[in-house]
Structures are given as structure tokens and as C-alpha cells.
Image (cartoon, rainbow, N blue to C red):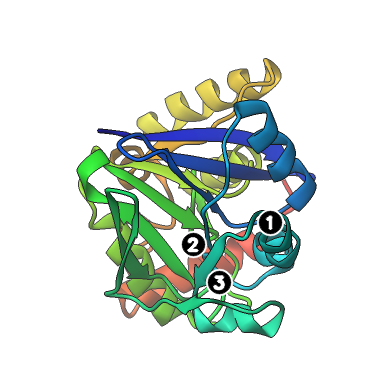
Amino acid sequence: MPLTVHQFPCLSDNYGFLIRDEATGKVATIDTPDAAAIQAELDKLGWSLDLILNTHWHPDHAGGNEALKKATGATIAGPAEVTRIAPLDRILRGGDTIALGETKFDVIDSGGHTLGHIAFHDAADSIAFVGDTLFALGCGRLFEGTAEQMWESLGRVAGLPDETIVYCAHEYTASNARFALSVDDHPALKARADQIFAARERGEPTVPTTIAAEKATNPFLRAPLLRPDAASPAQAFAEIRAAKDSFKG
């Protein structure tokens, strides 16, 4: 039976994700940006929380761990770096698997934004939760890792099947689109950007996206094509990432 994903906005630009394994009724939250908001959504849905899956340690992703565990008794699993701000019941690394009822998630090493960042891939349902590694038309800032590490991580995520539905953790897409248009004149990007701007004008989310859409239009995945004279693909990515870091548009 499929995995149900309930997406909702929280904090200033985060998304919360409550997921339910329909075969067993087991429920998890992907990260804990806002414990009160997550609890309110659980109450609205009539769901009880069994599992917390963290992608990385930042407070807008793991800051609600302790409050939700106290309220629900949920098990917490995530990369070891999460222990910088909250305890973990299980440490996860790339290559591990973890189950929610009958739904199996493969854990992907996606370090770069933080050193220990991970993503979760449900191959049976073609769904991935990527935290702050890959965004719609963007990628996470390199707060801890190197450009080489992030490029390799993006390659692992981009290597998922094209039809994979990608849930990223922030509504950054309009600003990402403005930057993308400044470095790439591909017609597919222009068409997608127009759709994004219209959706945001209507107050609609631009998450989730797909691997196919990101491979076709995301300047960070297209970096070697956009910077063909760079010494390496990772260097091409580093140049695009540096340009985004200083972009004022």
C-alpha cells in the first residue's frame, strides 16, 4: 500500500512533512521544524506519531525533536550530527535502511550543506525527502562541506529515477528561479520560471518537484554545461554556488 504525504507550511519558509504508511497506519515526521505546528497537524489528521526522521542538525530541522518525543514517545533517527542539539535513538548513515511500517527508506549520504546531512528515498513509491541538499531550482548553501562533497551528494540524489517525487524543505523556488535565469537561458527554464512565479502569485506551493524537472532546469545540476571551461564538474558547481551566494536579484 502507498505512502501518504501530508505537506504543510511552518516557520517562515519551511515545509513540514507528515507521512503515513497506509499498510500499518504508522506515522513519521520528516524533520521537526516546529513541534507545535506538527502536533497541530497530527491532531487535525487524527494521526499519532511513531517516528522522527531527521535529515540534519539545524534547529529548523531538528529543533522540535525533544518536545515531540516527550509528547508522543516517537523514536528519533537521524545522522550523528543531530546529537549536537538533541538525543537520537538511532544513528543513520548513507547506505542504511529504515522502515516505517511496511515502507522502506534507503538512506542517502547527502553531505555538503552540513557534513552529515542525509536524505531518505522510498523507492517503492518513487518519493525522496532531501532536506536542504536539493531545492526546486536550487541547492543548499555550503555551511560545513566542500563544493566537491556537495557535487557528489547532488549526483547521488540526481541519480534517482527521473520520476522520483522530491520533497525539499523550503519554499525558496521563486528566488532560485530568478537566480537561475541570470545564469542560464535554456527555454525550458524560462517556461518553468513563468509557471513558478504564477504559482507563487496564487499562493500555491512549488514543492514537491521531480528529479526529471531538476535535471532539466536546475542550474546547480547543469553546472558543467553552464561552465564548460571549469577545471572539473565540481569546480563548475562551485562557481555557480558562489554566484548564487552573492546574487542580489
| Mark 1 → mark 3, Cα distance in angstroms | 18 Å
x, y percent for residue 209: 42, 37
Of 189 and 196, which appears nearest the observer?
Answer: 196
| Amino acid marked by disc 3 | His
- Does dot 2 land on a helix, a strand or a loop? loop
Characterize the local packing of mark 1: few (<14), some (14-19) or many (20 or more) Cα atoms within 10 angstroms: few
Which numbered disc flags the more N-terminal residue, 2 or 1? Answer: 2
Q: Secondary structure at mark 1?
A: loop
Residue beneath the point at 33% across and 75% down: 94
Task: Give the quadrant of the C terminus.
Answer: top right
Distance in Å between CA atoms under marks 2 and 1: 19 Å
- The quarter in which the N terminus is drawn is top left
Where, by quadrant of the figure, is residue 76 drawn? bottom right
Q: Residue 82 location, x and y as percent?
A: 60, 77
**Amino acid type of disc 2?**
Thr
What separation in Å lies between label 3 and label 2 (alpha carbons)?
Answer: 6 Å
| Residue tagged 2 | 133
Look at the numbered discs 3 and 2 and tell me whether their residues touch, using CB distance below 8 Å.
yes
Residue 80 position, x and y percent, is 52, 83
Query: Would you say 154 lies left or right of 77 here?
Result: left
Instruction: Choose the circle earlier in sequence order: 3 or 2.
Output: 3
Up the image or down, 35 lies above or below 37; here it is below
Q: Is residue 104 above or below residue 212?
A: below
Is residue 188 visible to us here? yes
Residue visible at 29% across and 73% down in the picture: 96
Q: Residue furthest top?
A: 202
Which residue is labeled 1 in the image? 247
Q: Secondary structure at mark 3?
A: loop
In the drawing, does residue 51 fall left or right of residue 236?
right
Q: Which residue is mark 3?
A: 113
